[in-house]
């Protein structure tokens, strides 16, 4: 297996580098006649009381939340990377590689901002989202640096796997939305490897007890984000009713909340916890992380059981 270094990752990043204006704006527009998210994540077909048109509307609402969520998490990833830059230890190419990382994260935030503006203009109805973003950022960054590194690594590997495994070969999706995810993936795949190097740096300086504490705090961050996903599902329900002019009855609302909350959980938590690269990185930490990999596997089995049965875990 190729051993990545700051130098090799910097070289790849410079080759991949793209401009926001090259992929959004002008004649590069979203096509609202097509779904944006694969059904793997949108999970609209499980809601039998929806019409085909309503499923497409919900798919678009979920896609809005999908990219808005990435914009949100960039808000705590960027300060994490900037802190790592300030801790320069003289490793060759480390500082410029991380500076390139930070500049690309800023570019992604601009990409998502531009997407959200175009989405709101084309969708024609307001879609709610979580906030305020500063409070969410501060709540995550209140945890230890290593736990934030673990959470960041999970997010990076998750976004990379989403495109490769579910988006790239789905011919039914809007090509423009796929293009946004493709270009995001091209740089996130390098970010995941840079995150892995940073996590190894932190682990080398940590005791087994500190690693175990970092894993505990990682699960705390996951629980915090899961609470946010519940809130996002409620906002999506409101956005759906607003966009369609339809008020669901009590049973339909309950089913919507159950199915869609679990879909959000799988998209942003479960798919990260089952990622082989992420699990391998946890295994390399040693100490408490090795013992806690069983907890990750238990969560993974819960998500897989839900995907097969449609039941709430």
Image (tube, rainbow, N blue to C red):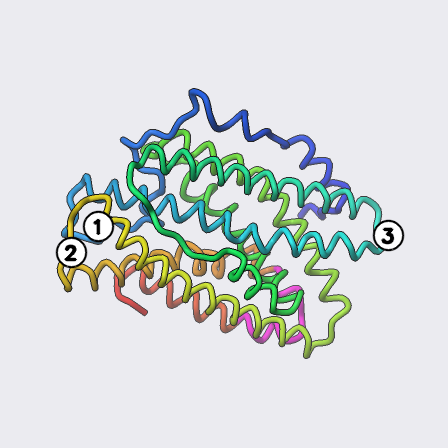
Which label lies toward us, 1 or 3? Answer: 1
Residue shown at the point (31%, 33%) measured from the top left: 172
Q: Quick check: is 286 in the magenta stretch?
A: yes
- Residue 96's spot in the image, x, y percent? 77, 42
Secondary structure, mark 3, is: loop
Residue shown at the point (47%, 38%) measured from the top left: 181
- Residue 88's spot in the image, x, y percent? 81, 54
Q: Nearer the viewer, residue 229 or 90?
A: 229
**Dot 2 alpha-carbon crowd within 10 angstroms: few under 14, some 14 to 19, many 20 or more:** some
Asked if the residues shown at circle 1 and circle 2 are in contact, with their CB atoms under 8 angstroms apart, the answer is: yes
Tag of residue 198: none
Tag of residue 90: 3
> Mark 2 to mark 3: distance in Å?
59 Å
For disc 1, the marked residue is 241
The residue positioned farthest toward the top in the image shown: 27
Asked if the residues shown at circle 2 and circle 3 are in contact, with their CB atoms under 8 angstroms apart, the answer is: no
Tag of residue 248: 2
Rendering quarter of residue 79: bottom right
Taking 2 as reference, is 256 above or below it? below
- Residue 231's spot in the image, x, y percent? 36, 62
Mark 1 or mark 3: name the one nearer the start of the chain: 3
> Mark 1 to mark 2: distance in Å?
7 Å
Q: Quadrant of the C terminus?
A: bottom left
Q: How many labels were placed on the picture?
A: 3
Q: Nearer the viewer, residue 269 or 31?
A: 31
Mark 2 or mark 3: name the one nearer the start of the chain: 3
Secondary structure, mark 1, is: helix
Would residue 181 appear left or right of 203 to someone viewing this image? Answer: left
Magenta segment boundaries in residue numbering: 281-293
Taking 55 as reference, is 280 above or below it? below
**Dot 1 alpha-carbon crowd within 10 angstroms: few under 14, some 14 to 19, many 20 or more:** some
The residue positioned farthest toward the right in the image shown: 90
């Amino acid at each position: 297996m190729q051993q990545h270094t700051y130098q090799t990752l910097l070289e790849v990043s410079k080759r991949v580098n793209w401009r926001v204006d090259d992929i959004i704006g002008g004649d590069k527009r979203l096509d609202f006649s097509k779904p944006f998210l694969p059904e793997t994540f949108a999970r609209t077909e499980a809601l039998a009381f929806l019409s085909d048109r309503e499923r497409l509307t919900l798919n678009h609402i979920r896609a809005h939340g999908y990219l808005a969520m990435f914009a949100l998490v960039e808000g705590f990833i960027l300060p994490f990377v900037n802190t790592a830059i300030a801790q320069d230890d003289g490793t060759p190419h480390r500082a410029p590689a991380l500076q390139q990382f930070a500049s690309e994260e800023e570019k992604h935030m601009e990409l998502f901002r531009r997407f959200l503006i175009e989405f709101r203009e084309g969708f024609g109805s307001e879609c709610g989202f979580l906030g305020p973003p500063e409070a969410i950022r501060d709540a995550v960054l209140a945890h230890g640096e290593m736990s934030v590194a673990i959470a960041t690594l999970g997010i990076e590997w998750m976004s990379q796997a989403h495109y490769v495994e579910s988006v790239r070969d789905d011919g039914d999706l809007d090509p423009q939305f796929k293009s946004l995810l493709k270009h995001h993936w091209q740089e996130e795949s390098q970010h995941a490897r840079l995150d892995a190097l940073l996590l190894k740096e932190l682990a080398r300086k940590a005791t087994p007890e500190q690693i175990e504490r970092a894993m505990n705090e990682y699960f705390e961050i996951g629980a915090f984000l899961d609470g946010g996903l519940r809130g996002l599902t409620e906002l999506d329900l409101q956005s759906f009713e607003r966009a369609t002019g339809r008020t669901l009855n009590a049973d339909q609302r309950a089913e919507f909340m159950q199915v869609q909350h679990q879909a959000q959980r799988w998209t942003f938590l479960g798919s990260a916890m089952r990622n082989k690269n992420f699990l391998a990185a946890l295994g390399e930490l040693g100490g408490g992380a090795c013992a806690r990999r069983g907890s990750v596997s238990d969560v993974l089995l819960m998500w897989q059981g839900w995907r097969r049965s449609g039941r709430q875990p």
